[in-house]
Image (tube, rainbow, N blue to C red):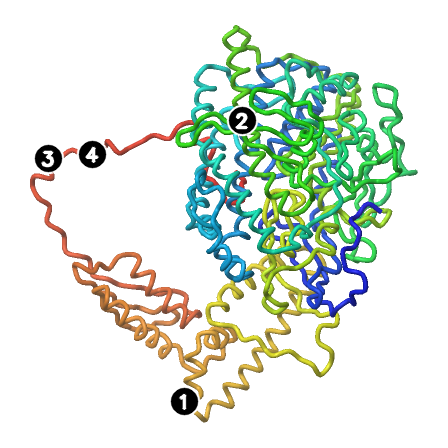
Amino acid sequence: MTATEAKTPAGQEPGELVEMAWDPITRIIGNLGVYTKIDFANRVVAECHTTSSLFRGYSVFMKGKDPRDAGFITSRICGICGDNHTTCSVYAQNMAYGIKTPPLAEWIINLGEAAEYMFDHTLFQDNLVFVDFCEAMVKQTNPSVLARAEKTAAPGRDIHGYRTIADIMRAYNPFEGEVYKEALKVSRTTREMFCLMEGRHVHPSTVYPGGVGTMPQPTLFTDYLSRLISILDFVKKAVAMNDDIFDFWYEALPGYEEVGRRRVLLGCWGAFQNPDVVDYRYETMTTWGRAMHVTPGIVVDGKLLTTDLVDINLGIRILLGSSYYKDWVGQEEPFVKYDPLGNPVDIRHPWNQTTLPDPQKRDFDDKYSWVMSPRWFDKSSGEHLALDTGGGCFARLYTTALAKMVDTPYVKSTGHSVLISLPKSQRLPEMTLEWKIPRWSNALERDRSRAYFIAYAAAMSLYFLEQAMERMRGGDMRVFAEFDVPDDAIGCGFHEAVRGILSHHLVIRDRKIANYHPYPPTPWNGSPRDSYGTPGPYEDAIQNTPIFEENGPDNFKVWTSCARCAASIPVCRAECTCTSAAVAPSRRSTRRCSAHPMGEQPDLQRLADTAVEPRLARLDAVLGQLEQTPGRTAELALEAVEILTEVYGEALARVTDLAADDPRALDRLTDDELLRHLLLLHRIHPDPLERRVARAVDDLRPQLRTQGAEVALVGLQGEVATISLSASSCGGGGAALRDLVREQVLTFAPELSAVDVAAPAPAPALIPVAALWQRPDRTAEATTSEVEQAAGPLALDGTA
């Protein structure tokens, strides 16, 4: 058993359990679900299971494809880390084809991947994770913490400029806070930097086996450099703000170090190849792996077990456990019995895996997820370790710090920390930041590491730029090496996706793909219980985590710093082991294990008007998802909704029948917005159509008069209402007013097929004669650069 030991104090009696579920977690791609049993009496999560409802199937349909297409196909595995998949696939193909990539191409790929880390981690940290630490959220979940933050000075105020901790929290308020908005601009800039090097975000168009299609020239690197320098102030401030917030959290909430804490079981597969060393030969993989500018390694209980990519590769095991697959062992012959060094390859290694899907009903006592359970076999202990990535950044910094192998002018590992040197920027002086190995592997430290790794990637980018420009000045402009696809070959690529460890294993037979298995961070972090009963890292991090939110079960907010491709996890940010996104709970189960024994019903919690609309919107979204979900379970769920709607409709009809003899009671029913909505929905509203339309117009008239407009009902013809709208010359009667009228009328009479709003044409305005001779001012026009076109509009979820 590799999971963290239970943290429940000895002698503590288990309390009544409340079942709560979040499925799908909506701040990431919508197929991760978290199911828990929470002991609110003892303020702890008693049990957790994580599920995935999506079967990707890439290992199935990749068979028989031309291996040169693998990078383009596998980049579609993820809408967030597509370039990481392309790069990793290229590494695997380089090994299979026997390619040594030209050095300048390696520097260009390193610059592209560094920009991706800066882009993704900024967007995730400041626009998703910090939603859970911002003033607007903490005001709801922990008002006492916010009150303390108002009085606590920010130690890093000379760097970031915010006087108190609460001021920092306000700066992260979604859509309004200064830092929140600045982070979006920085994400845009770093996305442009990526496109300079890899062509298109998030699916690269210029990265291939053998090199890149990016044409090296001085402006390529200076355009990248100018953008990099423009964000360095933000990078430095972000580290200071993160340190201030997380240090305060430990002080304000003693015991918070237990949130998301698990045994230190970290994996990092390395990043940023060293062109002077790497040749992609398996026989030399130990050497060129250790030369990477992020050191690969496996850390167990704070100790570095290995930095050898050969050892890392041979130790990977794919266990099935609680996943929806049949076992291939004993049914399939292994593709690879020995690696190129003569070492035996296990039948459960990705090179030998065969994917045999076995869909069935979800059962938390048996099978419950489409994610398998990858593990790393530790020969010294005999354990199958459920490694996590620490959200990617935590494991990268941890292994690099311990290994003491990275030594550049900008980044140095010391054996216990990582030193990151950033030059003078627009406002702030030269700085050396130090990430130190923390005492715990928990939610806060995973979050903190992300700000430091943004600085790490920025610093390494400066080094990569210097090396690329020096090579270009020396006249070496080669960025591609010719190659042939062999008849038979194997290859493996190791890289770091934004959320952590990423590997691609390739087997070629007769110049076609015979077997291909990509393993990104999500299967490692989000795996279910394995064949030995060991929970996956998400499950382990959430299970037994304490709850610090001040709300009870009836209005539990559940902080959720998730992450795309793996989450920080609901229940008080416990998970945060993977990565990309902060999660937002999507729904709560209403079933109770033993929360309210018979005869002890809780007081009914009434909903304010402001709370009704988002619930109706959520209901529409859930029903839409159900309608698109295949299978008998979804059909039964929709049938249950239809039957329940019919019963509730009949109940409402009986209420209106009882109120029919009391006009005042009937008016009160129809005046209530929620009841009016339901009466219209069930087509039992007591007022006739014309009366409802007239009332809609009457209710709107005072508002329009304040804008210099008059409105009147002209008449009804069938399912079409005609409305007259006139406006004064100063008030205006434009499209916005017409849309307002249509929306109001349809709210009261949704059965109408159309609402015609007639407005008299405004009198023509007088145009000064002199204006006819003036040329239009075109000085404000600006063209969009090719880089900005490639970057495209910035989506909040980080996808193209």
Q: Which is in the foreground here, disc 2 or disc 4?
A: 2
Q: Which mark is residue 421?
A: 2
Front residue of 37 and 150: 150
Give neighbour class at mark 4: few <14, some 14-19, many 20+ (Cα, 10 Å): few
The CA distance from mark 1 to mark 4 is 63 Å
From the viewer's perspective, is residue 530 above or below residue 646? above
Q: Position of residue 492 (x, y in %)?
A: 75, 26
- Pick whichever of labels 3 and 2 is earlier in the sequence: 2
Q: Secondary structure at mark 2?
A: strand
- Which residue, given by chain and number where applicable, does mark 1 sit on? 664
- Residue ID at (63%, 74%): 644
Q: Do the numbered discs 4 and 3 sit on residues whose CB atoms are within 8 Å?
A: no
Q: Which is in the foreground here, disc 3 or disc 1?
A: 1
In the rendered image, which quarter is residue 12 located in? bottom right
- Which residue, given by chain and number where applicable, does mark 3 sit on? 773
- Which residue, given by chain and number where applicable, does mark 4 sit on? 777
Q: Secondary structure at mark 4?
A: loop
The CA distance from mark 2 to mark 1 is 74 Å
The CA distance from mark 3 to mark 2 is 59 Å
The CA distance from mark 4 to mark 3 is 12 Å
- Pick whichever of labels 3 and 1 is earlier in the sequence: 1
Q: Do the numbered discs 1 and 4 sit on residues whose CB atoms are within 8 Å?
A: no
Give neighbour class at mark 1: few <14, some 14-19, many 20+ (Cα, 10 Å): few
Q: Secondary structure at mark 3?
A: helix
Q: Is residue 77 visible?
A: no
- Pick whichever of labels 1 and 4 is earlier in the sequence: 1
Front residue of 797 and 136: 136
Q: Position of residue 638 (x, y in %)?
A: 64, 65
Please name the amino acid that badge 3 sits on.
Trp
Q: Position of residue 693 (x, y in %)?
A: 35, 74
Please name the amino acid that badge 4 sits on.
Asp
